[in-house]
Amino acid sequence: MKQILTISTYLAVKEIWRNRGRFLLVSLVIALITLLVLFIAALGEGLGNGNREYISKLNADLVVFQGKSDFLIQASRLGRDRLAAVRRVDGVQDAGMFGASSVNLILADDNSTLKVAMLGVEPGHTGEPRVLEGSQLSTDLAEETLIDANTAIRTGLTVGDTLTVRVTQGTRDELFKLRVVGVTDGQQYSLQPSIFVPFFTWDRIRPKSEAEVNSLTSVANVFLVKLDDTAQVDVVSQRLTAQVGNIETADLKTTIQSLPGYSAQQSTLNTQGGFTLFIGILVIGGFFQIQILQKVSQIGVLKAIGTANPIVAASSIIQIVIVTVIGVVIGALLTFLFSLTFPPTVPIVFNGTTSAIAIIALLLIGPLGGLVSIRYAVKIEPLKALGLS
Amino acid sequence: MNTEINSTPNALETRSVVKTYQTDFGTIQAVDEVSLQVGAGEFVALVGPSGSGKTTMLSILAALLQPTSGQILLDGDDLAGMNDKERVAMRREKIGFTFQANNLVPYLTAVENVELMLRLNKRLDKAGKLRARELLARLGLGERLHNLPGQMSGGQQQRVAIARALIHNPSLVLADEPTASLDTERAYQVVETFAGLIHEQNRAGIMVTHDLRMCIYVDRVLMMRDGKLVRIYTGQEEIKELIGGGSH
């Protein structure tokens, strides 16, 4: 085995080195495919993250929706009176109201606006994100806000600043001022940077229809529930459904999958990534197949002088692996360099796991694409290759 | 025809070798009951018109083709009874081979091509490397050691192939039309060198050629026709007569 590896590596490396221009071109093609695959993966991650970031980072175990709302947060309406019932259910440690809306944040410098997700959460309850800087929200009625890292980067706001949001209520545009008391990590929601306000403040200043303007009832979208024991999700979920009327519950994963367009978007990007990998397999397979066809007589000579088939096959595999690895490394470096040039508005996120999966897949496409050519090389008959038959 | 050939202890002996092919038009007997012996240190030429079976015979002797029946004894081991793996090992260890053209691995230099045989046989040590260089220098390629095949002439490439065929001390050295792509002067040089090394290193050598002029360097000429070994020319007189006749 060692002998096979030694000789096949020797032959593979010599051939690559003496034809480095040709092999480098193939590596560059693989580098471009790598660039494309990594960007599609990063775009998928970025778009997905933009949709689910807040929910995926929640310290909640269950989300309570209005019955028959199909786990759609925007379609769900839960009155405050139901919250007490939820909190009373055995196994529930805490529950917090959550409301989501979209508002325009007026930037101080040029009066331009930035669309942000304004999320209503209960201070001290499930749903309020931890701050990295500053302090948590104080009371349910305070005119305070926490801004996420994305809002901070894009607006330049810091703790102690006052921000202004423009909201349409009924037929009037209203301006509300909120004092920034804390900055959280990235907490995007619905592909927007987010700001968090105390729930009752949110309920007062959120966009409203004419009918809602004078309503005195506080309505949340969903309740975020933390359990005593996370292993009891199913049991408590059943209890909640039984004891609190007209609700449905979902874990965070289901909630994320139900976000509008999330699954369709992810499957579209995954399909694109898959097709790019498939094209990579065809390109590499085509190149090595053509190369084997060009060197039939050369392989015939090697076999005629006593080179065993495992050496011929291993040499081809090693060549493919080397060319693929070089291509993937160049592609990954290019991707990294390009990523440095993107503004924060471009939803590209290089997640370690996703990138690693993409790179492993890219490393596998070489040997996969080359399988046919390796099989062909092994089947070359020295007699025919040398014109002796 | 069963022809007994007088020689030194036999490196190679074939006994009633037959090779038949089935075609749409019936059975073709490419090699028909050929028995021959080649001793160590003996260089013989295998000649004959196109279709006489000499290339098929060479392929059988090179362990590249299995005969339909008969025996091919190389140092007493019967090639005909061996499986693929054993025949690959025989080609690597006991047989040296030069071909008409495309002899060399194009991405290896002259010395690397020669050393390849030692690598395959796990015998590439300092002494082996030195021997490869000496052999190439002997063949007039001392200045071309690190040239790729594409940087050498046809004659130089053939000489590298000869060095590769001999470097691992094989029992049998085979050459298939080694002068086919060379001009006359180069052809004489190559065959003379080849013959000299075979005699000096005490190998059994067989050269298939259609150019009878090259037979002046061999010890015997075996003539094949229609798959049969029809005549053996022994001694310089007979061989010169054959060359002078200019026909098969």
Image (cartoon, rainbow, N blue to C red):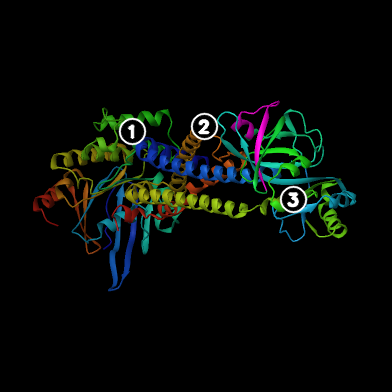
Instruction: Pick out the residue farthest to the top.
Output: A160
In the image, taking residue A72 as reference, residue A8 lies left or right, namely: left
Say which quarter of the image contains residue A166.
top right
Q: Which residue is mark 2?
A: A340
Tell me which segment is drawn in magenta.
A151-169
Residue A61 horizontal/vertical position (percent): 78, 47
State whether residue B232 is above or below residue B134.
Answer: below
> Residue B111, which numbered label?
1
Q: Which residue is mark 3?
A: A221
Contact, mark 1 vs mark 3 (Cβ under 8 Å):
no
Circle 3: element type: loop
Say whether residue A209 is magenta.
no
Mark 1 Cα within 10 Å, few/some/many (few <14, many 20+)? many
Instruction: Pick out the residue farthest to the left.
Output: B244
Say which quarter of the image contains residue B24.
bottom left
Tell me the residue at 38%/40% (across/down): A23
Pair 1/3: label in front: 3
Query: Please, what is the three-letter code of the amino acid marked with disc 1?
Result: Val
Contact, mark 2 vs mark 1 (Cβ under 8 Å):
no
Is tag 2's residue or tag 3's residue first in the polypeptide sequence?
A: 3
Residue A9 horizontal/vertical position (percent): 46, 39
